[in-house]
């Protein structure tokens, strides 16, 4: 089951992919039509896409793909590099993210997001996946110009308004055969710039849940952004960034300049 | 913030009436806390003193009330307690000016940033700071109008009744209004969010059986016992 949360005609709705009319093939452009819980069928561009579930604590991983860590010239970590994000940074599908003027390097990060479904406290690796409700795509932006060496990655670089994009769909765990073998891709203006696979995670999903739940209780709605592979490139105002993960859909975001935000 | 398991709030009688559950804090924002590091701030892995505010997040599993027991994990003998004034945001604060910043504050409370002691501030230290119950706050939210000057409040930390540390919000590198302006330049704060301004250093330490009480002028006191976790 794939579910979205959208705003439409004065309310927030749960929505699912609309059944395709018999006359259209699955390749048709109408594929993103939605069916709201109340039965209405609406076009993807006629709704406001919100993050597809109500996120609790947002936990993120840095340097969790060997190739990306190498790309950034980091040596292996003693333990997972974990940081937290606040609710103000979240954004849904087809949203707009600001690039501050004057910065040299702002990049996307396509990541598998793991949504907790059952309270997890001191959970062993072997039991970890029983605590997962489902998955979605995350695009976790960074502005590297603002990185400092204090509690790195610091919030000014990684916890900016609109810089954590989630969606478009929440996909039930039962519908993902193997979260440890999913291809991830990013396209900038249609050109493939990042490609990886979750099989290359340094700390995989079950181990992350074991590590985290050993010291913090994870609750339903908490979400773990598992890190990004190599292939991060600078993005500019006007760029359309599409993050794609096998079976989870395509998450679209557009970069905007300061002036669109009244700066 | 999703309601339900692990969600903690304190009702109060000015808008927005409840905490949102999002708690942010500034680290090394008290002159004495930065002074503890001395010349190390110029050396690797830091290379330079902080430029932007050094912020951390206390997630919802850490939030706890006055009176709740803070657990010391096996293999750790002492915890650190960072005593701080916390701002409770009253209305959406995005790019607020320093001169208007306090208009966005609904009230104040005491925040105890509990950590497993760690000497390295290079990484976010989630394992040391985000454990269950490691952010007692309260005892209540005192309305902004009841606090004449948030930049001149004494913060006293007691261990088992003995005074361990006295600090003042007058010694913050970024006082309340300045910090709000700098933080909301890149991250919007929502009604009910908490921003802890920063603790003095060195942070008092407490071992199993100790009771820590933090007092701030006009805000009451936050009192929490510390106990060794069962093996």
Image (cartoon, rainbow, N blue to C red):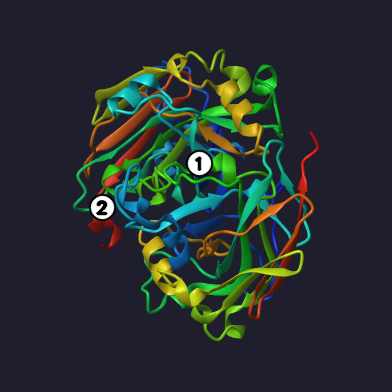
Q: Which residue is mark 1?
A: A51
Image quadrant where one finds the C terminus of chain B? top right
Q: Nearer the viewer, mark 2 or mark 1?
A: 2
Q: Quadrant of residue A32?
A: top left
Query: What is the CA distance from the residue labelled 2 to the residue labelled 1?
Result: 23 Å
Task: Please give the name of the residue rendered at 71% of the width and 33% of the height, measured from the top-left corner.
Answer: A121
The reply to whether residue B220 is in sight is: yes
x, y (%) of residue B211?
Answer: 76, 60
For this rendering, which residue is in front, B103 or A137?
B103
Where is A119 relative to B2, above or below?
Answer: above
Task: Please give the name of the residue rendered at 52% of the width and 24% of the height, measured from the top-left corner.
Answer: A19
Chain letter for mark 1: A
The reply to whether residue A171 is in sight is: no
x, y (%) of residue B59?
Answer: 59, 48
Discs 2, 1: same chain? yes
Whichever of labels 2 and 1 marks the residue nearer the N terminus, that label is 1
Q: Quadrant of residue A107?
A: top left
Q: Secondary structure at mark 2?
A: loop
Task: Please give the name of the residue rendered at 46% of the width and 20% of the height, measured from the top-left corner.
Answer: A202
Q: Would you say the residues marked 2 and 1 are in contact, meaning their CB atoms lie under 8 Å apart?
A: no
Q: Residues within 10 Å of mark 1 (few under 14, many from 20)?
A: many
Q: Which residue is mark 2?
A: A100
Where is A98 relative to A63, above or below?
Answer: below
């Amino acid at each position: 089951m794939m579910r979205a949360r959208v705003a439409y005609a004065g309310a927030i709705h749960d929505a699912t992919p609309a059944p395709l009319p018999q006359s259209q093939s699955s390749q048709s452009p109408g594929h993103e039509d939605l069916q709201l819980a109340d039965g209405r069928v609406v076009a993807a561009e006629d709704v406001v896409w919100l993050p597809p579930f109500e996120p609790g604590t947002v936990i993120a991983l840095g340097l969790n793909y060997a190739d990306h860590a190498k790309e950034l010239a980091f040596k292996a970590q003693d333990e997972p590099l974990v940081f937290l994000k606040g609710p103000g940074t979240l954004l849904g599908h087809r949203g707009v993210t600001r690039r501050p003027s004057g910065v040299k390097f702002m990049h996307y990060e396509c990541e598998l997001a793991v949504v907790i479904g059952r309270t997890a406290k001191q959970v062993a690796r072997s039991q970890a996946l029983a605590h997962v409700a489902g998955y979605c795509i995350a695009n976790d932006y960074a502005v590297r110009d603002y990185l400092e060496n204090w509690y790195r990655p610091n919030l000014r670089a990684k916890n900016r308004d609109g810089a954590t994009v989630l969606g478009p769909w929440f996909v039930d765990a039962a519908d993902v055969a193997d979260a440890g073998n999913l291809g991830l891709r990013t396209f900038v203006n249609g050109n493939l710039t990042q490609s990886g696979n979750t099989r290359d995670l340094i700390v995989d999903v079950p181990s992350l849940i074991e590590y985290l739940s050993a010291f913090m209780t994870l609750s339903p709605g908490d979400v773990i952004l598992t890190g990004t592979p190599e292939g991060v490139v600078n993005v500019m105002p006007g760029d359309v960034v599409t993050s794609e993960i096998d079976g989870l859909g395509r998450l679209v975001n557009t970069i905007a300049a300061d002036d669109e935000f009244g700066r | 913030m999703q309601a339900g398991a692990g969600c903690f709030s304190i009702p109060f009688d000015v808008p927005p009436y409840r905490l949102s559950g999002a708690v942010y804090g500034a680290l090394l924002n008290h002159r004495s806390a930065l002074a503890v590091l001395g010349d190390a701030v110029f050396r690797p892995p830091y290379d330079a003193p902080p430029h932007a505010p050094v912020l951390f997040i206390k997630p919802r599993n850490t939030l706890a009330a006055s009176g709740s027991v803070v657990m010391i994990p096996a293999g750790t003998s002492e915890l650190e307690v960072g005593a701080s004034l916390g701002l409770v945001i009253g209305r959406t604060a995005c790019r607020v000016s320093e001169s208007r910043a306090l208009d966005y504050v609904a009230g104040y409370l005491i925040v105890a940033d509990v950590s497993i002691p760690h000497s390295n501030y290079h990484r976010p230290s989630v394992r040391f700071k985000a454990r269950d119950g490691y952010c007692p706050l309260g005892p209540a939210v005192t309305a902004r109008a009841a606090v004449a000057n948030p930049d001149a409040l004494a913060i006293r930390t007691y261990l088992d009744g003995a005074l361990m540390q006295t600090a003042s919000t007058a010694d913050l590198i970024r006082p309340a209004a300045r910090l709000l302006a700098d933080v909301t330049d890149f991250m919007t704060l929502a009604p009910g969010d908490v921003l802890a301004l920063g603790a003095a250093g060195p942070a008092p330490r407490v071992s199993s059986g100790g009771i820590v009480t933090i007092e701030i002028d006009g805000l009451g006191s936050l009192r929490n016992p510390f106990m060794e976790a069962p093996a």
